[in-house]
Amino acid sequence: MYTLIIVLIVLYLIYNFIHKNSKRYKNEVTGPIAFPVIGNLHLFFSKKRHPHQILTDLTKKYGLVYRFYMGHIYSLVVTDPDLIREIFVKNFDNFTDRLHLPSIKYVGGNYKGVVMADEYYWKINKAKIISSFSNSNLKKVSHILEKTASDLLNVMNEYCSDQGGNKGNWAPRLYCQKYTMNIVLRYIFNLEIPYEENVNGRVSELIDSINSILQILKSGGAGDYISFLSPFYDFYLTHFQKDMPKINKFIEEIVMEHIQTIDKENPRDLIDSLILQYDVTKQESINDISCFGRELFMAGTESTANSLIWFILIMANNPNVQEKIYGELKSVSNQKSISDSEYLKLTLKDRNSTPYLNASIKESMRYKNIGPLGIPRACKKDIVINDIFIPAGCQVFQNFHGLSHIDQFWNEPYQFLPERFLNNSHSDVFIPFSVGPRNCLGLSLAQDEMYLACANVMLNYKISPPDGVETLDESEIFGIAIHPHHFEVKLEKRQ
Ligand code: HEM
């Protein structure tokens, strides 16, 4: 009996090996040798290189499009900008879906929200979200952004004036998280968490829960991609994971409070606008609205917070760039007799006058791309695009890290050189928000948040590594959003 089982297992492994490595279709691309069961996942076991770096390294051997098995799932890693547009723009209908994996199912509430929604729900929900975005009084968004950026400056001011009190160096992480979180909270839920509220309190708990949920997406690995482990992983997530219920409770309480206090003629925020589109007597509608709120909250906080954190770190390491930005901002602010904002010296209206800052923000997002592999999509039907066969069920990765770091597209890609964006938008390869109808919904919000925070922080403060430290560590921690190791900076108020 045991012998038979062993023979069957060995036969299966041989079959699986041949199946994965043989070319079954004309025009199929090749890739690294894939092993039975794990496929190419073993290549990620390196301690020195992160998955996005490994996938970019592989382009040297296999080119800008290659096949990579994530466990049993045939995946295509695409670093060819033309092919990315062919797939995600021209053939969008065939690549609308996300992959059905336990982690995506769990985080996306059974594929029903928007970020992790499957094709069916995405089509219904995206229309509702877009209509809510334009209905709600989000036209006031610049006011929300300015107020939140000014709150950030105020806490930084307090820090600076307290420095005599030995507060030590300034750690930007929680403050940047709070900045982006407050924008999303105000924008979606008409809520705010004042900076005076202890950063280690309720908000911090929420941030911790979000971080561990994002950790699930990051490390789904074996449970997601090794088929016989998936049901166990699914069971574990549904029954034992404690963070999602915490976030759900937080969001559901807000939605219920909105339902009770809504003024139908005057929606306060995105949740009110969604409530107007649903029959909220049904629990299912409440679940749907809560799911949108949760997903937007998660998609909109860590992504921009980490982009901002990287910007601050990079500025500390590049004093010359920082001085150049300051010079530009100072001259713009000197030319303004009155500010167009009740809160800030520089606003979104100044963007056209600050080309060097704009270039530096772009370059920081290229240099440290927080979402180096985007959110993969699934291929619906077998298709041949640009002479490349893509099978149904294939998972397609847009290799944003490769697009931002391959010599073929950039001179000195591992140097931080804002000048490269001064006369060239590089919009062919610089696409951190993805392309096509399912690209990032928060693109302009994220860009506005970045601009307001970077412009006003740079105008008001000089940032440098703490005394005795020459440069801050720029190495990356892999996650759903790539982030730096914990760091602190010295803040000096500009006169
Ligand atoms: C630096 C900041 C950000 C970056 C780099 C970023 C990048 C991305 C990327 C690469 C995708 C995947 C698109 C695809 O499937 O091809 C995405 C999706 C999405 N992002 Fe962002 N994002 C950022 C900030 C935000 C913000 C502030 C929000 C909103 C509050 C947001 C909301 C979303 C949503 C809702 C989706 C799902 C879109 C869909 O599936 O239709 N993002 N983002």
Image: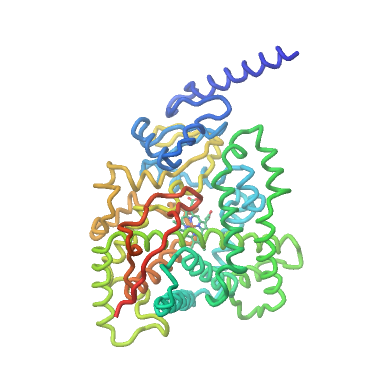
Q: Is residue 322 above or below residue 43?
A: below
Does 387 appear above or below 51? above
Left/right of residue 295 with respect to residue 321 in the rendered view: right
Query: Farthest residue toward the bottom?
Result: 337
Q: How many marks?
A: 0
Q: Looking at the image, is 167 positioned above or below residue 432? A: below
Residue pictured at 50% horizontal, 49% vertical: 479
Q: Is residue 32 left or right of residue 63?
A: right
Horizontal arrangement in the rendering, residue 331 relative to residue 432 (left or right): left
Q: Residue at position x 62%, y 46% from top?
A: 103
Image-quadrant location for residue 27: top left
* Image quarter (top left, top right, bottom left or bottom right) of the N terminus: top right
Structure colour scheme: rainbow
102 versus 426 height, above or below: above
Q: Position of residue 173 (x, y in %)?
A: 47, 63
Along the viewing direction, whichever of 184 and 26 lies nearer the viewer: 184
Counting from the top left corner in percent of width and height, residue 460 is at 34, 76
Residue found 40% across the figure and 32% down from its top: 387
Q: Quadrant of the C terminus?
A: bottom left
